Amino acid sequence: MKTSDKTHLFNLELVSKDDLRIEAVGSIDEANAYIGLAKTKIEDERLRKILHDVQVNMFRAGSQVVGGDEKITKADLDELLEIVRRMESEVEFPRSFIILERDEVSAVLSVARSVVRRAERRVVSLYRNGLVDYTLVEWLNKLSYLLYLMILAVQKGEYEPVEL
């Protein structure tokens, strides 16, 4: 029987809601929600399609974390890396620290990026405990970088530098 402080993994094992796997899948779910929000606000159709495809893969990532059969594969990672390579060639990189959040789209992408980074930290702990493959760690790491590149893309080289 499920209680308020427990939940089931994919294999129906009952675990505490503060179990590291639940923390990780919660961060993945939260990141996916922000990615979805960004998708509804972004005007560029190509970026919207990329975000949609990322959302589909986020379900695989969540499944993997809680012991499901769906997983992030090397092919998923390679596909993400190819998108990153293309975007790196298209954006203008800032020459200093910048404020990432210039408008609603870049702000939502920035929040999504920070939540993906949290999910990555949780998944690193799962990896160290032998619960997930390293490919998932790499995929989340490159996803946060892709979201950064998307922020640069929507800003179109118009950056607000930070003076330190």
Image (cartoon, rainbow, N blue to C red):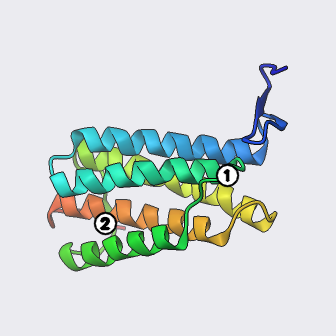
12 and 119: which is toward the camera? 12
131 to 75, vertically: above or below: above
The reply to whether residue 162 is in sight is no
Which corner quadrant of the image does residue 143 belong to? bottom left
Q: Residues within 10 Å of mark 1 (few under 14, many from 20)?
A: many
Q: Is residue 62 left or right of residue 51?
A: right
Q: Residues within 10 Å of mark 2 (few under 14, many from 20)?
A: many
Q: Residue at x 81, y 21 (%)?
A: 2
Amino acid type of the residue that numbered disc 1 sits on in the rendered structure = Val
Pick the quarter of the image with the C terminus: bottom left
Q: Is residue 13 left or right of residue 105?
A: right
26 to 123, vertically: above or below: above
Q: Is residue 14 left or right of residue 68?
A: right
Residue named by callout 2: 149
- Element assignment for label 1: helix
107 and 87: which is toward the camera? 87
Disc ID at residue 162: none
Q: Residue furthest front?
A: 69
The reply to whether residue 64 is in sight is yes
Q: Earlier in the sequence, mark 1 or mark 2?
A: 1
Residue named by callout 1: 65
128 to 35, vertically: above or below: below
Q: Residue at x 53, y 73 (%)?
A: 74
128 and 103: which is toward the camera? 128
Q: Is residue 42 left or right of residue 9?
A: left
Q: Are the residues flagged by discs 1 and 2 in contact, CB closer than 8 Å?
A: no
Amino acid type of the residue that numbered disc 2 sits on in the rendered structure = Leu
Where does the image place residue 116, in percent across and percent down from the top left?
51, 54
- Element assignment for label 2: helix
Q: CA distance from mark 1 to mark 2?
A: 26 Å
